[in-house]
Image (cartoon, rainbow, N blue to C red):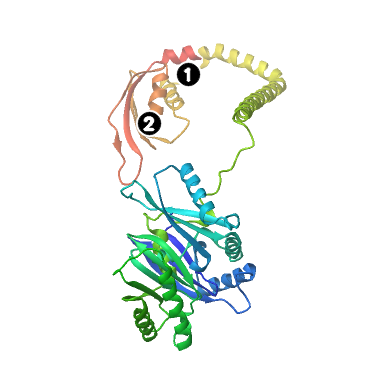
Amino acid sequence: MPSQRSHLLCITLTPSSADLAEVRRSGSGVQVIRRSTLAFPDSIGMDQPAALGKALAEHIEQTGYTERHAVIGLCSRWVLTRHKRVPPADADTMRGICNLQIEREFAGSAAEMTFDYQLAEGVDAENRSPLLLAGIHAKILRQVEQIADAAGLKADAITPATLAAANGQNGVVIQVEHGAAGVMRVSNAEVVALASCPADPSRLDDPEAQERLLSDLSRSVLQLPGDEGGSGVSLMLPTSVGADDARALADALAERVGKVGLIASDPAVLLAIYATEPSTAMIDFAASRLRPPKQSRVSPSMRWAIRAAAIVLLIIGVAGYLWMDATSHRDGLQAQYDTIKDKAESLDQVRADANLASVWYDKRPQTLDAMLELTRTFPSRGEIRVETLTLRADMSGQIDCSAEDRETMDDYFSKMQESRALLQINRGSVRPVGGNSTWINFPIAFSFDPAAMEARQ
C-alpha cells in the first residue's frame, strides 16, 4: 500500500551500500530535500545489523536527515519473484491461491521465506488478473528490521526496490546499483520476470570488471522468460557513474542484446516516487497480506459471555459508586446540619419576628424595592451592565442594559419574566456594541408591583 505521509525517508539497501533520499510530496510528484549514499565499511555487513544500524544512524545524524519514518527498498539480489495470472477473488481466497502457488514454485525453501504479492488492475480475455509473487529469505528480513531499529527508524514498508525502476517502463529494464543489478522484463507496466547478478558501477573504467558485468547482464537478459522483440533494453545507471563510462557500457551491451537506452537514475528517488504514487499496490514484506490471520483462542460463545460479564460488572460498579457517593454526600450534609441546628432555629425565629415588625417600621421607598428586584434577576453567568434606569411614579420604567452576549441577555430576560413583582415586561431591539466586541445593547420596559414584594416577605 502506498505511503500516505507527506514527508518520507526512502532507503535502498544493497550488500555494500545504502542510498538515502528525504522527500516531500509536491503536487503529483516528490521534492527531494536531501540525498546521500552510505558505503558500508569493509568490516560491517548485513550479517552485523546492530553495527550497520549504528553506522546508518550516524550517517543520518551527520547528513541532517530529520524524518524517521522510512520506506526501505531491497535490491534484486535478495528477492525472488514469480509472475502468474489468477481469477478475481477476495482477500481470503487470494491468500489461499498465493499460498498454493508458493508451495508449487518454492517447495524447498518456502518455510524459510516471507512472501507478499502485487495484483495488477485489469483482466485478460480469460478474466484473469496479473499477479506478481515476491519472496525474501526470513533471515534477510529480520536483519533489515534490526538495522532499522538500531538506526532509530520506523519502517513503514519493506519492499523490492527494483520494482520501482520498472514504473513507466516497457521491455527489458536493467537497474545497476552498488553491489547488484536487477534485470526485469516489463510488459504493459507489469513485471513478468526478475533476475539478478553482481555489479560494481564504480569499476566501469576497469576493462576486466566491465567485461564481467557485460557477461552477467547479457546472460541474465537471455534467461528472462518471454519475448519482447523490438522493445529494446533500458539501462539505468547511478548518477555517480561518469557520462563516458556509462555510454561505453551501453554501447558494449548493445552489441550483445540489441538496442539499449541509457538512463541516469537515483534508486532512492525512484523508490520515493513509487512509494507515494496513489495507484501503487506496493509489496510490503513487513506487513505481508499472506500472513495467516491470528486465530482467537476464545470461542464466539465465550467471547459473548465475557462481554456480557464485563457489562454487568460495569453496571454494578457504576451503581455502587453512585450509591457510595450519594451516601457520603448525605452524611456530610447531616453533619453540617447537626452543627448549625441550634443556631439555625434561633435565627429563624429572629427572622420571623423581624418580618412581623417590618410592617410598622419599614420606611423604604418602593423605588429601592424595585431596584432590589431588578438586581435579583441578574443571571448567575455572564456579565450585565446597567447603563440607565428610568422609574416613574406609577412604578413603570425602563432599564437600558449591555450584555456580554445573547445567551446572557436571554437568561436575564427569562429571570425577569419569572419574577412575580415585575410585570408587563417587554424587550426592545437588540444592537451590537460595534467593532470586534460581542457585547450587545438592549432596553427592557417593565412595571413594578410592590404588593408582590410584600407577599414574598
Question: Is residue 75 shown to the viewer in this render?
Answer: no
**Amino acid type, mark 2:** Met
Q: Is residue 434 left or right of residue 276?
A: left
Earlier-in-chain disc, 1 versus 2 = 1
Q: Is residue 323 left or right of residue 245?
A: right
Residue at the image position 35 percent from the left and 41 percent from the top = 438
Q: Which residue is mark 1?
A: 363
Question: How many residues crowd mark 2 within 10 Å: few (<14), some (14–19), many (20+)?
Answer: many
Front-most of residues 15 and 133: 133
Secondary structure state at the residue bearing disc 2? helix
**Numbered badge on residue 409:** 2
Front-most of residues 374 and 238: 238
**Amino acid type, mark 1:** Lys
Residue at the image position 49 percent from the left and 54 percent from the top = 116
385 vs 63: above or below = above
Question: Is residue 343 shown to the viewer in this render?
Answer: yes
Q: Measured from the top left, where is residue 456 in percent x and y?
A: 49, 14
Mark 1–mark 2 Cα distance, whole angstroms, equals: 33 Å
Q: Measured from the top left, where is residue 333 in percent x and y?
A: 67, 23
Residue at the image position 60 percent from the left and 68 percent from the top = 53
Q: Measured from the top left, where is residue 451 in percent x and y?
A: 42, 12
Q: Measured from the top left, where is residue 73 in percent x and y?
A: 49, 64
Q: Quadrant of residue 254?
A: bottom left
Question: How many residues crowd mark 1 within 10 Å: few (<14), some (14–19), many (20+)?
Answer: few
Q: Quadrant of residue 383?
A: top left
214 vs 165: above or below = below
450 vs 176: above or below = above
Front-most of residues 107 and 296: 107
